[in-house]
Image (cartoon, rainbow, N blue to C red):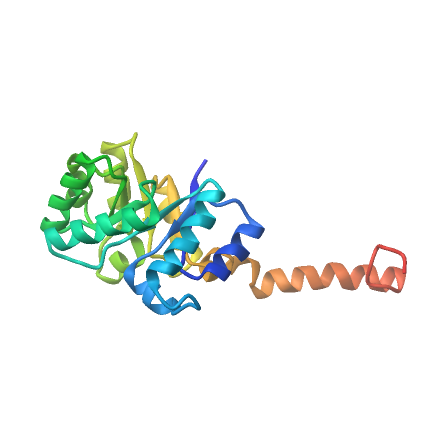
Amino acid sequence: MIRLFLDSADIDEIRNVYSLITLDGVTTNPSILAESRNKYGSPILALKVISKFVTSHGGTLHVQPVGTSYQAILDDAHYLLEELGEETWIKIPVTEDGLAAISTLSGEGVHITAASVFSFSQGMLAYKAGAECVSVYCNRAQEHQIDYEEVIRSIKNAFADKMLLAASFKNAIQAEKATLSGADSLTLKSNVLFSDLRTDLMRKTVEDFKASWTEAFGKDRIKPE
């Protein structure tokens, strides 16, 4: 069964989605946190609230350091773990400094999601450095003429037992293609996650059912008034 995550730092949105479906956790990044500008006033307070909610529902929270140098990544990661708990997964883009940080942190027993992966080479290096999960950025790859489906297939063929999280989706079709290519986990923004519930076809289908019933029985409910 595929694992499903919500890509969000909006606690109200997170709570709403959890009320509708079962999720395996939440992923964030610095851009998502910057966009949310939520009522808690500080990103670390927001993350604490999100972490408490997600872990209480049996999920995992994936958080990315802002620092980009080896030491800055380590400093941010250690701070996040201190504030949010050691069960937090640290997302690290697979640069040279990121790879070094993955190696160090994984050696400390930290759960690592290797992020911003656009090639087989990045995925291979990340797993070999100790990452438990590799995250392929699909729409961003497609925008740069990179075949994300082939990237997913090649990584999954070589590392079948490892977690591969497909991310960065513009639409639900991309998520479907990522799954068919071998991704065992997806993270989506809520507008993409629920997009197929809001199509004209879906709306018209439901309206037609109701219209048929109303025409036959003169009311728009089954329950007696």
Residue 147 at what x, y percent from top left?
Answer: 25, 52
Nearest to the observer: residue 94 or residue 137: 94
Nearest to the observer: residue 169 or residue 127: 127
Quarter occupied by residue 42: bottom left
Q: Is residue 103 visible?
A: yes
On screen, residue 180 versus residue 144, left or right, reads: right
For the C terminus, the quadrant is bottom right
Residue found at x 22% / y 48%: 78
Please count the marks in the image.
0
Residue 153 at what x, y percent from top left?
Answer: 28, 40
On screen, residue 76 versus residue 59, left or right, reads: left
Residue 196 at what x, y percent from top left?
Answer: 53, 58
Q: Can residue 117 be seen in this view?
A: no
Quarter occupied by residue 125: top left
On screen, residue 183 versus residue 100, left or right, reads: right
Residue found at x 61% / y 60%: 202
Nearest to the observer: residue 156 or residue 22: 22
